[in-house]
Amino acid sequence: MFYVNATRVRDRVKALAGAAEPAPTAVVLDIGVNSELDITSAEVLIELTGTLRSAGVDFALAELHTSLLGTARASGFLDALGDDHVFHTIGQAVDELSLRGGVRVP
């Protein structure tokens, strides 16, 4: 995810979450392919976090590289997301959110 495709990623996540049956209780975005986080992407992720959560859908990240943490903090994205919504793996995210009641696992 980077500034060129950030809104496309946001729109796709919103479309998939909105069309899912049953409605999801959480979305986990695997951000592991990113080695950098630009300010546009951070702003779009802040917006996506708010949009999903206002719809009752929790949002978390998996595979966030340490190199992204500085920008994620400076942009306010980690404040919006919450440190407790950043996970090393998708499996860890699903397990933890399931325990919190935020994921329905089929």
Image (cartoon, rainbow, N blue to C red):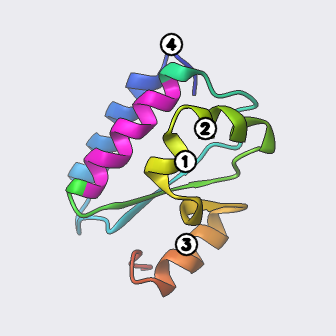
Residue with the mark numbered 2: 72
Of callouts 2 and 1, the N-terminal one: 2
Q: Residue at x 73, y 61 (%)?
A: 88
- Real-space CA distance between mark 1 and mark 4, rounded to the nearest whole angstrom: 21 Å
Mark 3 packing: few (<14 Cα in 10 Å), some, or many (20+)? Answer: many
**Upstream in sequence: badge 1 or badge 4:** 4
Instruction: Specify the amino acid type for callout 2.
Output: Ala
Tell me the CA gap for discs 2 and 1: 6 Å
Amino acid type, residue under disc 4 in the picture: Val
Rendered position, 100 above or below 61: below
CB under 8 Å between discs 1 and 3 = no
Residue, far right: 66
Asked whether the beta carbons under mark 2 and mark 1 sit within 8 Å of each other, the answer is yes
How far apart are labels 3 and 4 at the CA level?
29 Å
Can residue 33 be seen here? The reply is no
Q: Earlier in the sequence, mark 2 or mark 4?
A: 4
Q: Nearer the viewer, mark 1 or mark 4?
A: 1
Q: Secondary structure at mark 1?
A: helix
**Residue pointed to by mark 1:** 78
Say if residue 28 shows up in the picture. yes
List x then y, in percent, for residue 91.
65, 70
Locate residue 104 relative to residue 32 in the image: left or right.
left
Sequence-wise, the earlier of marks 1 and 3 is 1
How far apart marks 3 and 2 lie (CA) works out to 22 Å
Q: Which residue is mark 4?
A: 4
Q: Which residue is mark 3?
A: 94
Is-magenta flag for residue 98?
Answer: no
